[in-house]
Amino acid sequence: MEEDILNSELNPELITSKVLQKKEAEKDVETDKIKEEAEEEFRHINNPTANLKPIVKKYLGAPAEIERSKNRFYISDGDARVEILVVSEEIIRVRLAPHGVFLEEFSYAVPNLPQYKGEAILTESEQEYRITTPKVNCHISKKDFFISFSDQDNHITNMDAEPMHWEENVQFGGYYVFGTKVCQPEEAFYGLGDKATDLNLRGKRLKNWNTDAYSYAWGQDPLYRSIPFYISLDKGIAHGIFFDNTFRNYFDFGGESHNKTSFWSDGGELQYYYIHGPHMMDVVKRYALLTGTHAMPPMWALGYHQCRFSYYPESKVKMITAKFRENQIPCDCIHLDIDYMDGYRCFTWNKKYFPDPKRMIGEIAEKGFKTLVIVDPGIRVDDNYWVFKEGKSKHYFCRRSDDYYMEGHVWPGRCQFPDFTNPEVRTWWGSLFTELMEQGVTGVWNDMNEPAVFGSGTFPDDVRHQFDGFRGSHRKAHNVYGMQMVRATYEGMRKLMKNKRPFTITRAGYSGVQRYACVWTGDNIASWEHLRLGNLQCQRLSMSGISFCGTDIGGFSGNADSELFTRWIQMGTFSPFMRAHSAGDTKEREPWSYGEPYTTIIRNFIELRYRLLPYFYSVFWEHHRYGFPILRSVIMQEQEVVMNQGRQDEFTYGDKILVCPVMEPGQMSRRVYLPTGNWFNFWTNELVEGGKEVEVLTPLENIPIFVKAGSVIPEYAVMQYVGEKEIEEVKLNIYYTNGEVKSYMFEDYGETFAYEQDIYLEKKFIADGSKAGSFIIQQTSEGLYTPRYDNYHFNIAGLPYKPSKIVINGKELVHFTINREGVVDFRFTKNFKQIEVLK
Ligand code: MIG
């Protein structure tokens, strides 16, 4: 008996009463009545803590029963409950309530949960409950509560290695929650937002806790953003897991135990979405269905941005902007870092440096420059500062558990911080931009919103947040704080700018942040290693739902030499967000700073960015509207090719242009992998067969760029900034294919929300060379927008024959030329239906 007690979970030292021993003895014959009596007695004993069990991890027991309410299924093990929700044919959500009570449903990541219209089928066998949609089966094992998922061919894509488990958190309440899946021998893992490491995360343990990571190193973790979403790829089949949990959370991809993949968190609910594949692209698109995509940016935001910590005073800003025009290097936007403010107080100007901001902004706007300013969350404690006074009187600043204000030192000195998780505070914050907008500011950069605090790093855990009415400490709100700040900024600007599209940048974020902002990768370093890292970061962000991203071109800290800066500009030309930025203690770093031949090469690439703008803009639309990632790693294009798991240098922008940055000094040539199919060397129009690696020359003047055969790539004439010139015609670069290839082009006003009212044009081109001696291009379009230009300028490259005749809409075209490289050149109205290029 005594031994039994010692071995039980009861703490023997605390067992003082006979009542308890009696209770233990009666364990097997307990009836409700006896229980009641025992509890009666229990209340009268001297030591009520006697019954306490030590805190251990608890696991789901065998499922006892299942209930359903439409497409929600509840399975209980007698105490804990699990909810399985069918979100769509391909998405299933799993939630755990350790003692049967679920937390209130609320998510910053998923504001509008899709409602599944169909009906899931529930079946039961001796071994399992099974919930089935036309695409996925969710299996709940009756023996051990393991949950697994399989496809229509009954191939298991994901399965528990342990039942879901949890551990009580005595200090804060709630539970640490854990999910553990089987990690297959050859499974690879992608995604997870911004991790400074190789694309495949296999073998790694990573943490999500937004961190100001100044000059981060390769492998440093965590960084600025938390995106608890990963993509698994096993034997050519992909699925995704989105662990929607804002607390400090962790992922282990076969690191601790080679055959287990786990994710766990310091609090909140064990709540995850299983996202079915089988293609990585499907998983990414379905993740976008849950968490949203970037809104269409104003077209100018896809141009080149120039930044530095900091450009001041006004004369410097004028000088820099003038130099762009003098050097004929295109640029759309100049960024003002913290020194434009008065003592780093947000929403003020340093009047010594900028005596009349409205005039200055207007003057540089005449030269085609947009002005973008930075804001930080820290508001200086200063009773003579209107923002602080307002925030204080309205109780908008965050407080500690004992009601003291959360105070910390940041750039302005002693600061308090708005609670952006309070919708009223967000509205207030949004309204603070009124004056800046009136002065002509068109973009806002949200920095330090992890939130960063000098010395301590961030807020202490006990800071309280309103959390949109669902309340929480900083443990719960930390990872969403920055996202809610930029949300407030974006929504405020959207109101103030009426029908114009705001442009916002954020450093911190959580899943769904893409709905409010573009992201840059924070304080990187001017090194070749960081150039390589930046490539990986942008690719990974793109497949993690944050397509609109870029690095500080040239590296924030340290000095980039001429070659590094040039190579970085070349890579940055193919980053969805293209901005050069540098810390204040570095050498000047504008596109002309390095002299020739660098300035010319840099100009050529920035010009290339502007030439390709209509293509970049169309790819953005594909992201916005359909959830496609903008940058696509080769593994996403050919996930069945195992070797692609190790290929991470090359990527495509959209699905037509493949880029391979040069990331080593002095590199005169490099190997580039081209996915299966035919490709054209962008620089030479040479046809190259894919499905293999090719050696490509990489003189400083260029980097390897290839265009997929059959592509129609729209091109603008070079402009110094978007809107400098009326678009008089669009060039269509068409690349021959012996098959059939579709291309898309999106056009609209470029800066309004009219596209939400269907005022846009989505053009589809089908290039078809499947019949020998003929190459046909057809155009169809959808939407209500009419571009103002009349003609296309056609360039058809790569024809395997010399054309003798071109027939457009059934009529023979009289004038066309063929240049030395065999490129066929002619013009025709933008309304053509069909072009036939005949042998
Ligand atoms: O404590 O605003 O990452 O881009 O230039 C540093 C000054 C604050 C960090 C940002 C960087 C910016 C800098 N900021």
Image: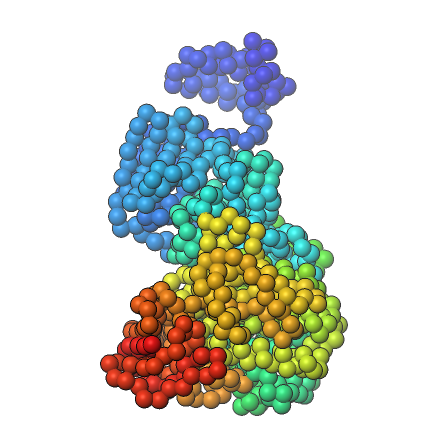
Closer to us: 357 or 530 = 530
- Residue drawn where x is 45% and y is 79% of the image: 822
Direction from residue 648 to residue 837 in the image, left or right: left
- Write down the quadrant of residue 838 in the picture: bottom left
Direction from residue 116 to residue 587 in the image, left or right: right
Quadrant of the drawing holding the N terminus: top right
Colour basis:
rainbow
Residue at the extreme left = 810
Quadrant of the drawing holding the C terminus: bottom left
The percent coordinates of residue 760 (x first, y second) are 34, 76
Closer to us: 462 or 197 = 197
Q: Is residue 415 visible?
A: no
Q: Is residue 95 visible?
A: yes
- Residue drawn where x is 48% and y is 46% of the image: 232
The percent coordinates of residue 688 (x first, y second) are 49, 65
The percent coordinates of residue 686 (x first, y second) are 50, 71
The percent coordinates of residue 318 (x first, y second) are 64, 87
Q: How many numbered circles does the render carry?
A: 0
Direction from residue 592 to residue 293 in the image, left or right: left
- Residue drawn where x is 57% and y is 68% of the image: 704
